[in-house]
Amino acid sequence: MRQALTRYIIRRGLQSLFLVWIATLIGFTIYQLAPGGPLQFLDDDPKRTAADFDRLSALYGLNRPILVQYLAWLTGEDWFTILPGGAAWQSGQCRVNAERCGRGILRLDFGRSFYFKGSNVIDLIVERIPATFMLGFSSLVISVAVGIPSGIYAALHRGKLPDHIIRVTTVLVNTVPEWWIGLLLLIILGGYLRLVPLGGMETIGDGSLPDRLHHLALPAVVSAISGWISISRIMRFEMLEVLNQDYVRTARAKGLPEHLVIWRHVLRNAILPFVTGLSGIFLIFLSGSILFELVFSWPGMGRLAVIAINSRDYPVMMGLFVISSFLGIMGVLMVDILYSFVDPRVKYEL
Amino acid sequence: MKGYRYPAHWLVVILVVCALLATQCAPPTTPPPEAQATPTAIAPATPAPTETGAPATEQAPTPTIAATLEVSQQVITQVVEESEAAKAREPQKGITVVSDEDVTTPRTKRGGEYKDVATSDAVSFHPYLTTDTASSSYQGMVYTGGLLRLDENTLQYIPNMAEKYSISEDGLTFTFHLRKGMLWSDGQPITARDFEWTYQQVINPANEFPYLSQLGFIKSYKALDDYTLEIKIDKVYCPSLGQMSGLITPLPKHVWEKLPWNDPDKNPEMNKPSVVSGPYKLVEWKRDQYAVFEANENYWYHGAPNISRYVIEIVPDQDVAYQKMKTGESDTGPITPDKLKEARQLPNITVYEWWPAAALWSYIGLNMRPGFPTHNLHVRRGLSYAIDKDLLTEEVMQGQAKRLCSVYPETSWVYNPDVPCYDYDPEKAIAEFKQAGYTFQDGKMLDQNGKQLRLKLIFGPNTSKTRELIAVTVQDYLRRIGVEADIQAMEWSTYLEALHSNEPDWDIYIGGWQATIEPHIMYTIWAEENIPQLNSVAYINKEVERLFEEAGSNCDLEFRKEKYQQIQRIIAEDAPYIFLFYNKSWSGQNKRIKGIVPTALGIGWNMEDWYIEEAPTP
């Protein structure tokens, strides 16, 4: 049994790594195919000449074939010299200064940013992880705290007025893009009523806990909306499914008080698939906060991604891509493994 | 119980990957900057192109220009027989210019904090790597301007860090004498060695300076002693004085020479400069959140600026930034054209307005390549007549713009009012089309084969409301003379790619440039060698190129003016563009900020003299 589990984890782990690699290949190709490039900021600047453009292209190695650029990104370019004529594959910067040679993602070198003028990609990302994590985590907490009770409530009052009210509200709210709700609330609550700050993570020069919570409140609530809606729906669905089970009827038949039936038999069974999936949901929350980060000037990874995409900063885009696909794929792997612990009926096979 | 497994986890994996892909590849929500020419060299890294789609909103106070103070007298030792303006702009041969400007009297209205908002953060404090506006304004806070600066009234170059300069008889050697007593923020003197060292780094091709070719005309750049710089050039080139004196702002050699020039890992000065020459010192910079500056007591120009602290907060949305200004959370904010009326009524805000020397202007580019209908001169002229540019200026820009008839706006010293302007006249338009072999029949413009003329019109970025409005208005006017226009709005990068394609498939596009104070820079957009990049319409006229060459190599003012005026006439006659309008600039400032004087250089030129009314005076 234990052996089977280990084998399962190893196999799934390897598969996941393969999946991450495929994702990088797809990501790299898509980014390279998008129009423009890291030097597009010079495209229509009459102060530069074609010579300036070519010089920078060669320095950054952007004049190399895409495959070579991918290889350099994956494996680094310092070893290219051992290939016959391989030095020509190195970027100009690497040839001038060996310290500027990329070492490749396989050696955990995420490279250097074009847009941020040589800053290490990993530093740029790490700098922004806490903000994204804070927003993602608090909106998850809020959506669970609101979503589960409202789902349960709707299920228990199925077909009655509260259920309808909850359903109609969720459908209504769901039809409006949340970032738009965010912008609207920001302008009403922040601009006119001045109850909340107009974006940002802290007041400049303050940064105390109450100040941070004050800044966090609106973005967390707004970005929790979609999570709250889907959690509430899932919860209602799971509850209804369990409520129809025979053992629930049995429990009722043997005269158990209704609240005990709900609490002990229905809720516990209904919530199980949900709890195990939570880690995966959390990762989705992390990746879903791009628009909210934009609306609320939240200095997280999402805003970095937007900057990188707008400026065609390939290394930063790829860095974020690798990290988020890694997180996502690992999240799912984690859910699978956890689930197999929780539910002994799950077999370790593929 | 073999059957039960966690359902469809592969599906979940794929979904997650797809979701990630989708979020990562989401279209940019902030409009990227627009096709522009850049203004003359004032700051070392010149402002990057600005979006003309939302004109002037990004023109808010750019502290970039370390230019300051009221014009003071200059003593011109060898008076040249020229007009006032001539002395000014033209690097004369065999002259010496001395400044007796007082630069030491300290400012008296000190104190307080200015709260700025910006929609995009700087990239780096390194003055020789960046090209964006945000970075150059940050750099302008901490690094002082060049040897000379533009006078805000006459737009002429006047001594700045150099108190005296002279130009040799042959016009090829420039000698600058630095002011003595200028200090870095750590108390070390600013010397000619700093300039020379900085120049040597900048011209190293491995050092990534994007505008290296702009310095190509300099033959040598030497510090003769601590306070004398000698710059030699190959041949007489009229914009040279501005470029050589503006492109290089010194970096502190004693700090930087031990550090790698362009590696932020090993050179902390790149993103957190500790020794500076400008009006402010950097206190803290949190990327994408805020930057805090405090007055530099050692600033060479009248000492510390009046306002003691300067805070820039990053807000990614213009609406939110505007709200901040409205609520007083910030002292300024972007005002989009549609909010201008409201902003003028705000009780706490003064809206300053000016016609900038480096105005943004809009045009419709006509593809002149053979095989396109617009290859024919009469078609281009016909299209020019067909569009009511006065109405466009009035309606689209709501009075915040003026008509433009050729390459230079009225604010330029070479402006030529006497060029064909193609005032709206559908009769003339149809007549021009007839000359090109078209027939106007049943409300349709038919070509020789009896097919209706259809033109493909592109514009970008698709988020620009102004350009969208221009596009649909143009479409409407063309329909009146029986020409169908198919509009295609494009995302910024796609638009640029289409524009700069070697084999374009569009007939007309909507574009914009920023005028330059030095007229010569506009040469690049009409030169054959810049097809298809800057010269996207593929305009080829050897006469125009010859006139530009002549105007650049003979520095006599009247001579140059005449050449540029001829150029304007020829280009207007050739009608490669339908010239539309150039924009006014404006900026909203909280009423507590005093001392703001809008000029053709904007309002940022005397930022160090701004003061806060309620601030306690020491």
Image (tube, coloured by chain):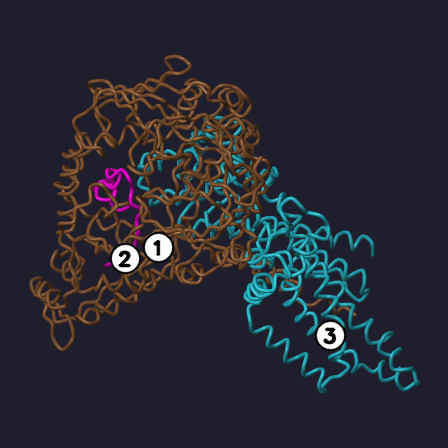
Chain colours: A cyan, B brown
| In front: label 1 or label 3 | 3
In this rendering, is residue B524 above or below B392? above
B355 to the left or right of B184: left
Question: Which is more foreground, mark 1 or mark 2?
Answer: 2
Q: Which residue is drawn at 19% across and 72% down?
A: B480
Say the numbered circle drawn on residue A284.
none
Q: How far apart are marks 1 and 2 (CA)?
A: 9 Å
Residue B410 sits inside the magenta stretch: no
Asked whether residue B162 appears in the rendered view, the answer is yes
Badge 3: few (under 14), some or many (20 or more) residues near its Cα, within 10 Å? Answer: many
Disc 2 from disc 3: Cα separation: 54 Å
Q: Name the residue under label 3.
A: A150
Is mark 2 in CB contact (under 8 Å) with mark 3? no
Could you tell me which secondary element the residue under label 3 belongs to? Answer: helix
Query: What residue type is disc 2 on?
Result: Tyr
Q: Which of A8 and A214 is in front in this view?
A: A214
Q: Which range of residues does the magenta coloring cover?
A: B506-533
Residue type marked 3: Ser
Q: Is mark 2 on a helix, strand or loop?
A: strand
Examine the rendered structure and indicate whether residue B134 appears above or below residue A22: above
Residue B509: which disc?
2
User: x%, y% of residue A263?
Assistant: 85, 74
Q: Which amino acid does label 1 sit on?
A: Tyr
From the top left corner, tell me how far across and down residue A292 is, in percent.
58, 59
Task: Specify the quadrant of the image occupied by residue B97.
Answer: top left
